[in-house]
Image: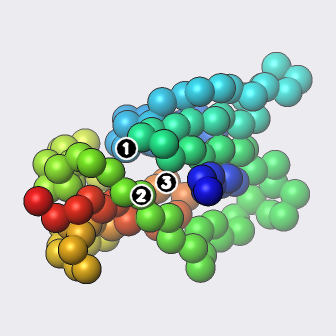
Amino acid sequence: MILSASLTVKDVRTSLAWYRDVLGFAVSQEHERGGMLRAVSMNADGARILLSQDDGAKGSDRPKGEGISLMLTTSAHIDEMATAIKARGITLDNEPFDAAGMRAFRLRDPDGFKLTISSERK
């Protein structure tokens, strides 16, 4: 099985840039409707996400990312990845730590979606 995530975001262009520039996701497809960017399909190391522009129908200030945490496993060196992300001005929720044979850190995307990035401890 492969799990993909679909996230409704406040500003699809901001989220696209964040996932591309911070986590290294690549755009696989842009989805336009009426000449406007409405969603972006992205992937990195087998992980796939769909970022969809919030249409505001449920209110523009509704909270996002509550009650969910996305866990991404990578072969990258976690400490180096965390250092590079912090160098881009991103604040981590947790500095790299060891747990259950993994090395991991936590952060949030621009909409508050929680992400845990981990790899096998080396």
State the residue position of label 2: 72
Q: Please, what secondary structure does the residue beneath circle 1 have?
A: loop
Q: Please, what secondary structure does the residue beneath circle 2 have?
A: strand
State the residue position of label 3: 110
Tell us which disc is closer to us: 3 or 2: 2
Between residue 19 and residue 102, name the one nearer to us: 102
Would residue 107 be seen by someone viewing this image from the given angle? no
Evaluate if marks 1 and 2 touch, with contact meaning CB atoms under 8 Å apart: yes
- Percent coordinates x, y for residue 97 in the rendering: 18, 73
Left or right? Give the position of 43 relative to 64.
left
Identify residue type, mark 3.
Pro
Q: Please, what secondary structure does the residue beneath circle 3 have?
A: loop
Q: Residues within 10 Å of mark 1 (few under 14, many from 20)?
A: some
Q: Residues within 10 Å of mark 2 (few under 14, many from 20)?
A: some
- Percent coordinates x, y for residue 4 in the rendering: 62, 52
In the picture as drawn, the residue positioned furthest to the front comes out as: 1
Label 3 to label 2, Cα distance in Å?
17 Å
| Protein image colouring | rainbow
Q: Residue at x 81, y 49 (%)?
A: 55
Identify residue type, mark 2.
Leu
Q: Earlier in the sequence, mark 3 or mark 1?
A: 1
Picture quadrant where residue 20 is located: top left
Q: Earlier in the sequence, mark 3 or mark 2?
A: 2
State the residue position of label 1: 23
